Image: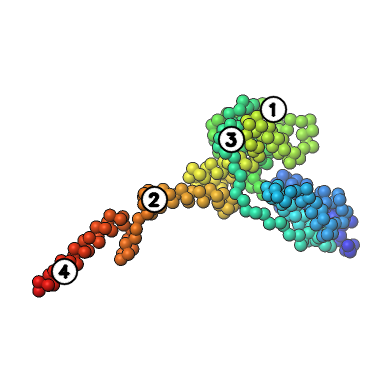
Amino acid sequence: MGQDTKSTLVSPAFGFEMWKADLALRGLSPRTIELYSRHVRPLLEAYATPNEAEIKAFLAKRLQGVDAKDGDALERRKTTLRLSIEALRSFFGYLHSNRLWNQNPAARLRTPKLARRERKCPRLEDVRKLLALDLSTHDRLFLALLLDTGMRLGELATITKDKIDLSKRCIVIMGKGAKERVVPISPSTVELVQWQIGSIGDSRYLFPVRSKLEWTLTAHECDRNFERRLVYLCKRAGIERICPHQLRHFVATYLLERGADIKAVSGLLGHADVVITLQTYHHVGRRNIEEMHKRLGVFANRPQVPQIEARTGQVVDGEAIEHKEDEHERRCTGKRTSDRGR
């Protein structure tokens, strides 16, 4: 790979920290930066100066070991692959545009297409079994916040005490793209939050990591603690495994099926645009349309399909049509009789 002595680094790895700093200046949250970094760092450890072919070979390994017949596993791996490609495009795009590296080996990478699938949503009875367990206050709180607000797991892990207003019953959440939003919480959740604040001492975070190595844990590892805990609770409840993000889908589906305004739900979830909410939960909209049609459609609540009067196109019942035909016949018969009389 040819190098420009004035503007090229010894290897892309030397621009890694500069790229992360640029992401921070652009407003990306520390969690997003950490997530992107985890997809770029392994490549730089494997190849000092990776070219396009080496990047493709590295990414291809991500799909190895996945049964092609297991659609769910394959789609999950493709999702991870898409994120890897986005991170690599960002990294090499930064180096190339700033003349730190004279080529962009990730520029022509194509993201795999994902099948459009209906979001897997936990059953209401399973969620009830989960909440019916004899839970610690800590476990009850993190489940209550996920189910009360529909927040993302990463947003839950980074709640700070200074963003909680118990008097107004709300929490300011730092969402994607470092965008803040305010979410309401119910009185029962307020009580749990109040207890948690009293038990964590001087920690800045509502959910501090209980470890002497807290400062070494990444956001991803903190998330894994919650995920493992939820898996354990599902086993205790004797229900199918539920991941934290599925509880977010449960909240959105629960609200939409009960007639909640789509814009309000979109705001609660922190979607950048209501279109995202519509696309994500299109299956709920379809069910609502079907239910509305059954209750309010033109032919709703009729034992038989009504007929259409040929002459006027008016929807009428069978008895009305028969009555009109009899009346028409009597008028025609009377007219012929009067004609003969003349």
Q: Which residue does the numbered mark 1 point to in the structure image?
A: 201
What kind of residue is marked 3?
A: Asp
- Looking at the picture, does residue 99 appear above or below residue 299? below
Q: Which residue does the numbered mark 2 point to in the structure image?
A: 300
x and y percentages locating residue 302 in the rendered image: 36, 50
- Direction from residue 307 to residue 58 in the image, left or right: right
What kind of residue is marked 2?
A: Ala
Please give the label number shown on residue 126: 3
What kind of residue is marked 1?
A: Gly
Disc 4 crowd, CA 10 A, few/some/many (<14, 14-19, 20+) = few
- Of labels 1 and 2, earlier in sequence is 1
The Cα atoms of the two marked residues, 2 and 3, are separated by 34 Å
The Cα atoms of the two marked residues, 3 and 4, are separated by 74 Å
What kind of element bears circle 3? helix
Look at the image and tell me whether residue 187 can be seen. yes
- Of labels 4 and 2, earlier in sequence is 2
What kind of element bears circle 1? loop
Q: Which residue does the numbered mark 4 point to in the structure image?
A: 335
- In-front residue for pair 40/292: 292
